[in-house]
Image (cartoon, helix red, strand yellow):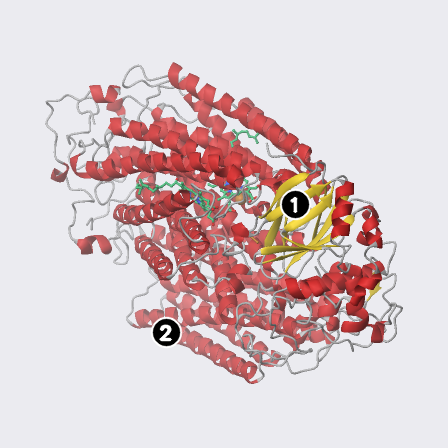
Amino acid sequence: MDIEKRVSPDLPVEPVESRVNYLNAQYGIKSWLLTRDHKRIALLYLGSVSLFFMLGGIYAMMIRLELLTPQGDLVQSQTYNKLFTHHGVLMVFFFLIPSIPTVLGNFLVPLMIGAKDLAFPRINLLSWYIYTLGGIFTLWAMINGGVDTGWTFYTPFSTTFSNTYVIATGLGIFINGFSSILTGLNFIVTIHTMRAPGMTWFRLPLFIWAHYATSLIMILGTPVIAITILLVALERAAHIGIFDPALGGDPILFQHLFWFYSHPAVYIMILPAMGVVSELIANFSRKNIFGYSFVAFSSIAIAVFGFLVWGHHMFASGQSMYAGMIFSFLSFAVAIPSAIKVFNWTATLYQGSISYDTPMLYGLGFIGLFLIGGMTGLFLAALGLDVHVTDTYFVVAHFHYVMVGGTLMGYLGGLHYWWPKISGRMYPEGWGRFAVLVIFVGFNLTFLPQFVAGYLGMPRRYHAYAPEFQIYNVMSSAGASILGMGLLIPLVYLVWSMRYGRVASANPWHLPGLEWRTASPPPTENFYVTPVVTWEAYEFAPPEEMQVVGKLEPGDAGDNPIEVAP
Amino acid sequence: MSEHIVSKKIYFLIFGALMVGTILTVMAAFVDLDYVFTGANTVVALTIAVIKATLVVLYFMHVRYSTRLTWVIVVAGFFWLAILFALVMTDYMSRSSGQYNLGSG
Amino acid sequence: MAAQVESHGETHGAHGAHSALQHHFDNMEQQREAGSIGMWVFLVTEIMFFGGLFMAYLLYRYKYPMGFAVGSNHLAWKLGGFNTIVLIVSSLTMALAVYYAQVGVRKLQIVFLVATMILGATFLGVKAVEYHEKYVDHLIPVRGMFHYEGTLPHGVTQEQVQMFYWIYFAMTGLHALHMIIGLGILSFLVYFAWRGRYSPEYHAPVEISGLYWHFVDIVWIFLFPLLYLLGRHLGEH
Amino acid sequence: MPEQASTFASRVDALYLYLCGLTIFFTLLIVSVLIFFVVKYRKRAPFEIPRPIAGSIKLETLWSVIPFLIAMSIFVWGANLYFTMYRMPKEPASAMEIFVVGKQWMWKVQHSTGQREINELHVPVGSKIKLTMTTEDVIHSFYVPAFRTKADVVPGRYTSIWFEATKPGRYHLFCAEYCGTNHSGMGGWVEVMTQTDFDNWLSGNANQMSPVAAGQQLFTTTLGCATCHNADGTGGRGPALTGLFGKTVQLEGGVTVTADEGYIRESILNPQAQVVAGFQPIMPTFKGQLSEEQILQLIAYIKSLSPGQTSGTQVTTPARSNNPQAGAATPEGQGAKSLDSQRSNPLNSTAPRPPQSGSSNNTAAPNSRGNQNRQ
Ligand code: HEA
Ligand code: HEA
Ligand code: CUA
Ligand SMILES: [Cu+2]
């Protein structure tokens, strides 16, 4: 609020175009499609990821519309099954897993560590093409008839019984997997080899730690889902009994292989968001993070231990009870690093200087919603209780709390936070705060009732349901329309602000991070002079001491935060 | 750090060891070692394979002369594979009849 | 774009301006290290990729030990063994190609790269012969095509043998695919080596491709005993 | 809170409430601290630089250890409950066994006294019921919210759960594992009745053969098992079956297995896979000739030859007298035939299967099961 007041209205607003930056360095379609600049690739990803999010959202709205009434009268059951499958596949594989890493990560990892680009710019571009190809493949399958297996592709239904486009969709996901692997590989190598002088591991922003941990999961887990999907395709095509009990195969093996990736994948989704939130909380309270090394290492711990708990999706599936016990124990263990993060974020606020800008509101929203989502994860990890609630709406509510309330909030928060850096323009603050409120209310109205419906016994993936659950579903559908509207707002104003937003200074929030020490938007090389880092992470200093290293002339407008407000 | 050039002699030595390993593998495979314990043949075969693979990794792939990071990466790869094997097999090997799973025999 | 790279720290200087240096790296050393770590990380993903199949192998072998032994004993272990030797020799030639790139003997470097390619092609040729034999013997694990004709010992069913064979084909097929990709990479290397691109200062591509080639060799080192030899001690069935 | 109608219900709900309490506690704790800090330490001047606080090992330890201990309390509680729910009660003889077969998209139930039901399950209040379940096609999940229990049924395997209903009433039965087009329609009702009502219901539906009787008929007449195993199961060219169930069996090749449901099923479908020591592998396979229900009937019959081990048939109800062997006059599987939609099965061959059967028909052979040397 106070930031806005400090804008002196008569200050001439310098047009962005006057400074050479990554956006105006080159023009034309070709300069985008063949770019090797990580920042442009991030924008390519932003476009495609948003597209898939909207598609997934439209499917979600159709689901909610159908579930308004218990009878299942809007669409046929076969169609409904395709709706939630498409929704799940698009949201998980084509939106949430790539979202933060490929958009914000791509843009910011080099900036934050003081590098000129990722280690392998060409591979970075390649990963976008692979992603797009996988997406087109999947969309093609969906348009041609779709899939009805659920995003989990359980055998033997997917291999033998479903007569929809399983192979085509599977190949789409398979291809997409390589894009994920390449992104992870690029991040790991970049973080290891390309840090600016003085940027030691413990001076890295927590966003980088989170992305490092995420990349570990991407490279270690994704190949397994790739081979698993390949086996499903092979089994469907040749019918040789890999997962078919009729031929000596074991359908549970599929579940092991699938969840070996897909559980860690949920941490691919949440870890980058946790990284974003660490940035938001520290920076908007203008303090260093409480317990830096605990927050940093908890990311690594989540990534590593996250690989040991996949069997908690299989408590009622015919897995051995003893294996179930081990997996349950480890699931509780892996919750501790998340708890550590939550407590440290809270403690960071203590004696801070907290501002209520939109990104911070998303950050605070994240903590609250992730808390509920995470705690309900504990319900599911409790063996005897999971038997009752598994495959009910309780699970649906749990994962929407962590994925939408958690990751989506983190993603939107990050997008707002770095929007001035990405676009060189400010988003409208008032609309931003309003949208947070609408999204928060809509979200809770959508998914809180689902916990109740789930505990009462409403199974998931149900096209028609028992009438006594209707009240909760009506609430949920109502909430979903509010949520949809809420999400529409940022969509509109972010696009609007790219052209009409107020010009942003290099450092609109007055923060010490490296990414704020170059121009907004940054030049193609990020920094004209390779920065030498002499400060700790989140080490706040008076504005005149904060050196700006990524500008053309020393007197560039917008460098001095006191003269030029955002 | 600059790269280390491994001498030709070492390459040929390793090559020799690999050939010997291969021959040993084949020879061991035809001897019935089940009297030692069931599956002894497999254990022998895998031990030789692991030794051979280690030699390739250390010398042909220069890990012996590489940074700690490379070591960590290599070890991590196999460690994660072990996680997959261990936890999946925990499930299958601890399934017993008479309880929840009445899986066959 | 910034052709003139502002280097940092003490590391810059000597090889700052090598023509192969990409603009976003500070120096050749950093570029080389990035490439090498990148390849290692990639190999880890390969381990996990093959890992899924090894998992299936482990589980089904645990379930059907005898079925696997029967299936395995029907493989041509002599051809497999020959291929093992071929691959080990190719690993040696690859290592030598890297060596001559490091010391800068272009001719020998090309000779050994080509030798590696010939050995790789030999491997694939033998593999093709083996696949053909399996085809003739109705051992292609596709529904309706598979039939093991030998006598089955107690407790072994057609399905179990088929289970072995799909794993055999999946694993060796994936391995062969990697060999083919490797041959593709090698032909690029030969081309650039012939053009004189590699020198003692800059030969990272040769080195990195070498890592890949050795990895494929390692996979085979495991596949050979696990697939061809697992039931030999039980005698022929 | 859904209706509590089994002995598990209140125990699951107690754990649930404990967790709800924890969730509310932590949410209130964090959210109120959050709001307090956010308000108290809001920015007062533009470029404030608050005093940096590095952290505190003491606090970190505190908020790692306490949540860990809490988490462990949930773990122990949950695991304990899990074992209660999924491990069969100690005295199997006291449980009444009911067979359940899932199939796209219906639940087929057969009582040990012969009554068949579809998408309905009638059980008496207050006695332990053991369900032995399998499926003909894909994975389904048997779920009764009021009982707080569910379990996936997996093709080629038997899954057992048990429960004890505590309150008469009509409760939802759902299929909880996604199984295709009509997944949401694959459900029905569980009718919990008082013992007298249940007995009446049994006698009102008593004109059906019990699984044991049906199994016996399959055994002696229809399939001709008796030729080798002898009509009373005492054995002949094939091993004796009396007293077999639950025993350890010595197989050809030195392996031993426990003769449980899975073993018997395996021996019927894949006789070559597990040959009993000292016998010739002469038994033909019955793969493709039997429905899942018929296999369950055979198992029931073979179990009944081991009196100590049998479960279902031991339950004495008045209805049993109304359900005499005379019922055997009805043709075999009268129920089985009419309920089973007579899947045509291309795999009704004898082992080893010739290299044909090229039909890649999706629904082919859901009845034939692979063998499993180990579980
Ligand atoms: C972003 C994604 C994400 C995240 C982060 C999580 C986090 C967790 N999840 Fe979730 N989960 C999913 C996405 C996610 N999950 C999805 C998509 C599914 C369903 C898939 C499908 O079937 O389609 C699922 C399903 C799922 C199941 C299977 C349910 C079933 O099918 O029966 C289980 C079971 O254990 C589970 C557990 C957990 C646990 C213990 C955590 C933990 O990591 C949470 C840790 C966080 C906290 C605990 C909160 C903060 C802590 C405190 C405030 C301190 C207090 C803490 C203690 C006292 C311990 N999840
Ligand atoms: C990233 C993951 C993600 C996200 C963001 C969402 C978002 C939403 N999901 Fe999703 N969901 C899953 C992942 C996700 N979901 C998964 C994995 C499943 C399981 C699938 C399976 O069982 O296989 C699932 C299943 C699932 C179900 C259960 C279906 C069933 O079991 O039968 C439901 C039901 O309510 C639901 C609802 C919603 C809603 C209302 C949203 C909303 O948050 C969406 C809001 C977004 C938009 C609306 C789009 C953006 C806005 C606009 C473009 C503006 C214009 C639009 C309007 C005004 C309408 N989801
Ligand atoms: Cu049967 Cu869902
Ligand atoms: Cu999980």
Report the residue marked by disc 2. Answer: C110
The location of residue D36, given as percent across then percent down, is 43, 16
Q: Is residue C58 visible?
A: yes
Chain letter, disc 1 residue: D
Locate residue A399 relative to residue D316 in the image: left or right: left
Chain letter, disc 2 residue: C
Do dots 1 and 2 share one subunit? no
Q: Is residue B51 visible?
A: no
Name the quadrant containing residue D221: bottom right
Q: Is residue C162 above or below residue A111?
A: below
In the image shown, does D17 or A301 lie closer to the viewer? D17
Name the quadrant containing residue A113: top left
Q: Amino acid at mark 2?
A: Ile
The location of residue C68, given as percent across then percent down, is 66, 71
Q: Amino acid at mark 1?
A: Val
Residue pictured at 54% horizontal, 51% vertical: D185
Q: Is residue D150 above or below residue D354?
A: above
The location of residue C101, given as percent across then percent down, is 38, 66
